[in-house]
Image: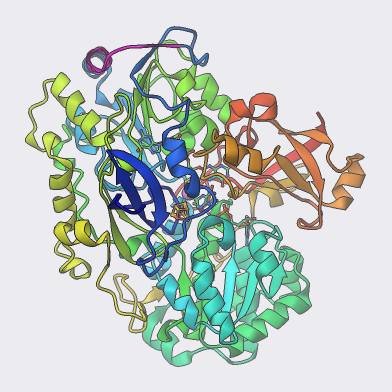
């Protein structure tokens, strides 16, 4: 890279690590993209996926021009049109829909393709524009709705430990989280703790690559984690190891919660969770006598009927043990609630109250009331529940569908108009990790290829085509970034755009080490609120004995080589991912006469996907596993696991049950 210009940026993908990167630019071309060794959390390493990012920006199937549909919906047949033609058509259609049906007939469907505060779902992208039109609101709950809600009810915030402080823990529970796949930079901090004698336990229905590396693996029955938490606390109480002083000073509802714990002895918990009583007891003893204990509980375990309650009850553990007092103690889910940018979406621009539609409910809410679906940074046909029903909704002739994309996804195939979007090296953006405490700036490194435009620029041009006069619709990217940083929150004091552009990343003003709840919680009373009596465990959908013909519980977590459906079309990563597999325990395979490597249909009433059986002791009897992220049209049978994921709400935050589905397996 000698002689090349170094441009600092950040990975935009929906991954907790938000790596800092350096793009080498020569003659206006990006010639290299490497991890930035200076960033304290990500320290120079990217990952197997993003090591190929530059190659991905130049992929042969990249969408470079606006397109208009010429074939039937879903066929993916398009003709090239100009930006003026595309924007005129969209402007005319939106105006007609607003006049005839009201703005609520528009559903702006933004996903997690980029977590940028300018270009993506975390911040302002398009939202002022939609407010001026009075468009319906979009509730982006697909990823963490249940967990966020459960944690906020308990702690007043979904944020907790600084993940870097796991280096100080003496006992680490990796609870429903596949660290080495879904955010691997945490691992160095875990290894540091281990070098100082920490014991690491993975609690997961799958023996993942992370569980392989842990000191111990507890094969929990999916969706039963809250019961395990109660069982572990039962041992803590039996040992009289609760921190009475902390409980008295900083919690409320302890008496009722204590009864709840006492009614969950280890034997009962073993029966619910499928973990041997002796293993529950052993871990309970460790928990009772190891300070500090750090819990890393992330998104996997909240993709269940009781997902909100699971996070809620697990997060009670460090309050009972008093771990929140100690650096390296407590719990880390997401750090997002520690980020206090000023996300001013200008609700005041709305003409009146408007209805909200829910990201995970596209299958049922894409009804006659929706006349325009405007999709950006999302691929619902690949990623949202009940994909067959979504496809039926997208076929409706009177639905006007716009998709802003990099690639011809299964969702883009249903669009009336496709708009070409920039990738991360081609636009500015502001980021924060959800697994660390740094703000990051991504400086545009190169000019966009073809006619690609950023999200912000697309909405500025669309506003102009519609003749909208609200001045804030035309704020530039740098103005928007300044506004975001200008919240006045003490965590951002001294964090300026100039500094971010110069340094690439800045740690927000939090102490190091950080004990956020040593002296109380950001709830109204200042105290942690234990789950009310009778509400500390909600069983999974798949625990309901409903006489259904589907007897296997399917979990579908993150794939190592894809990031949701991003990279699902990358030839090299697809080659590494090989054909889709479904992990099946020997007992379940024998009961169905299935052999290793056999091609099968995994099916239920919602649909089916095709995979090859891998007979494996990585899953227990009754549990089968595949992964998310493949493009349906590039998969055998034309479907991925979301064909069998039912659209069902979790107990809180309307989270989706991606890991909570009954299926059966038959020869293909
Ligand atoms: N390589 C890669 N990295 C990713 C992603 C990706 O697609 N690929 N996705 C990104 C996104 S969007 C997110 S939200 C995060 C998600 O990353 P994680 O939070 O790690 O979530 P999942 O991958 O859904 O599931 C993690 C683990 O939880 C386990 N699990 C499932 N059900 C249960 C349960 O009931 N109890 C317990 N204890 N464990 C359970 C799964 O078997 C899995 O091993 O990762 C991000 N990082
Ligand atoms: N079965 C199963 N399904 C799951 C999950 C699971 O665990 N199991 N996990 C769920 C989770 S955690 C999540 S977060 C969701 C994610 O679901 P989505 O939010 O739909 O994310 P992706 O599938 O990655 O699709 C994002 C799309 O945005 C595009 N994109 C990226 N950057 C930009 C940009 O700057 N502009 C525009 N216009 N487009 C861009 C990408 O090309 C990609 O096609 O998936 C969920 N789906
Ligand atoms: S996907 Fe995650 S680990 Fe990979 S480069 Fe992006 S932020 Fe880093
Ligand atoms: Mo996610």
Which residue lies at the image location 41% right of the left edge and 41% below the top edge? 113
Instruction: Where is residue 414? Give x, y as percent.
Output: 47, 19
On screen, 222 above or below 382?
below
Horizontally, residue 106 falls left or right of residue 326, namely: left
On screen, 225 above or below 10?
below
**Which of the pair 10/97 is nearer the observer?**
10
On screen, 467 above or below 613?
above
**Which of the pair 590/157 is nearer the observer?**
590
Residue 257 visible in the current orientation: no
Instruction: Where is residue 287? Give x, y as percent.
Output: 60, 83
**Which of the pair 296/30 is nearer the observer?**
30
Instruction: Where is residue 201? Give x, y as percent.
Output: 64, 73
Horizontally, residue 486 falls left or right of residue 228, namely: left
Instruction: Where is residue 383? Give x, y as percent.
Output: 52, 37
Magenta part of the chain: 78-94
Residue 328 visible in the current orientation: yes
């Amino acid at each position: 890279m000698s002689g090349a210009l170094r441009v600092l940026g950040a990975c935009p993908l929906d991954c907790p690590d938000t790596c800092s990167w350096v793009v080498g630019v020569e003659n206006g071309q990006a010639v290299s993209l490497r991890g930035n060794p200076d960033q304290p959390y990500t320290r120079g390493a990217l990952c197997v996926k993003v090591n190929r990012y530059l190659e991905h920006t130049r992929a042969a199937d990249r969408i470079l021009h606006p397109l208009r549909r010429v074939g039937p919906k879903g066929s993916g047949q398009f003709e090239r049109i100009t930006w003026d033609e595309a924007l005129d058509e969209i402007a005319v259609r939106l105006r007609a829909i607003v006049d005839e049906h009201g703005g609520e007939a528009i559903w702006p469907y933004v996903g997690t393709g980029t977590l940028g505060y300018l270009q993506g779902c975390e911040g302002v992208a398009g939202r002022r524009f939609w407010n001026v039109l009075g468009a319906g609101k979009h509730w982006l709950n697909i990823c963490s709705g249940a967990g966020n809600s459960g944690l906020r009810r308990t702690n007043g915030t979904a944020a907790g430990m600084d993940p870097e402080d796991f280096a100080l823990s003496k006992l680490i529970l990796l609870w429903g989280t596949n660290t080495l796949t879904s955010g691997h930079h945490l691992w160095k901090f875990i290894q540091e703790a281990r070098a100082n004698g920490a014991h690491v336990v993975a609690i997961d229905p799958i023996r993942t690559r992370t569980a392989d590396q842990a000191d111990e693996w507890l094969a929990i029955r999916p969706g039963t984690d809250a019961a395990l938490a109660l069982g572990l606390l039962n041992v803590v109480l039996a040992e009289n190891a609760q921190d009475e002083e902390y409980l008295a000073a900083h919690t409320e509802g302890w008496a009722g919660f204590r009864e709840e714990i006492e009614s969950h002895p280890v034997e009962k918990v073993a029966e619910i969770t499928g973990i041997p009583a002796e293993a529950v007891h052993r871990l309970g003893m460790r928990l009772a006598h190891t300070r500090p204990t750090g819990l890393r509980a992330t998104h996997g375990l909240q993709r269940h009927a009781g997902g909100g309650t699971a996070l809620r009850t697990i997060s009670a553990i460090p309050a009972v043990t008093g771990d929140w007092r100690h650096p390296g103690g407590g719990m880390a889910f997401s750090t997002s609630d520690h980020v206090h940018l000023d996300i001013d979406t200008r609700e005041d621009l709305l003409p009146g109250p408007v209805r909200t539609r829910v990201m995970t409910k596209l299958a049922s809410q894409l009804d006659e009331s929706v006349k325009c679906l405007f999709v950006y940074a999302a691929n619902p046909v690949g990623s949202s529940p009940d994909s067959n029903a979504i496809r039926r909704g997208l076929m409706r002739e009177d639905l006007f569908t716009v998709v802003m994309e990099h690639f011809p996804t299964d969702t883009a195939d249903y669009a009336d108009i496709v708009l070409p979007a920039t990738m991360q090296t081609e636009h500015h953006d502001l980021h924060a990790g959800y697994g660390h405490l740094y703000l990051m700036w991504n400086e545009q490194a190169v000019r966009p290829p073809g006619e690609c435009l950023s999200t912000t620029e697309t909405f500025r041009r669309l506003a102009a085509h519609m003749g909208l006069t609200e001045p804030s619709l035309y704020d530039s990217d740098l103005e928007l970034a300044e506004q975001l940083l200008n919240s006045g929150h003490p965590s951002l004091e001294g964090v300026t755009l100039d500094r971010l552009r110069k340094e690439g990343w800045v740690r927000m003003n939090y102490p190091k080490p950080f004990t956020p709840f040593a002296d109380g919680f950001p709830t109204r009373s200042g105290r942690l609120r234990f789950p009310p009596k009778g509400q500390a465990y909600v069983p999974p959908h798949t625990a309901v004995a409903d006489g259904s013909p589907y007897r296997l519980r399917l979990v579908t977590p993150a794939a190592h080589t894809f990031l949701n459906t991003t990279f699902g079309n990358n030839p090299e990563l697809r080659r590494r991912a090989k054909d889709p597999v479904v992990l099946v325990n020997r007992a379940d395979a024998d009961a169905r006469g299935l052999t290793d490597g056999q091609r099968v249909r995994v099916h239920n009433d919602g649909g089916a996907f095709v995979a090859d059986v891998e007979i494996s002791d990585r899953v227990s009897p009754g549990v089968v596993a595949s992964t998310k992220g493949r493009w349906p049209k590039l998969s055998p049978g034309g479907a991925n696991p979301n064909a069998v994921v039912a659209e069902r709400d979790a107990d809180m935050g309307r989270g989706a049950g991606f890991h909570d589905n009954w299926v059966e397996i038959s020869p293909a």
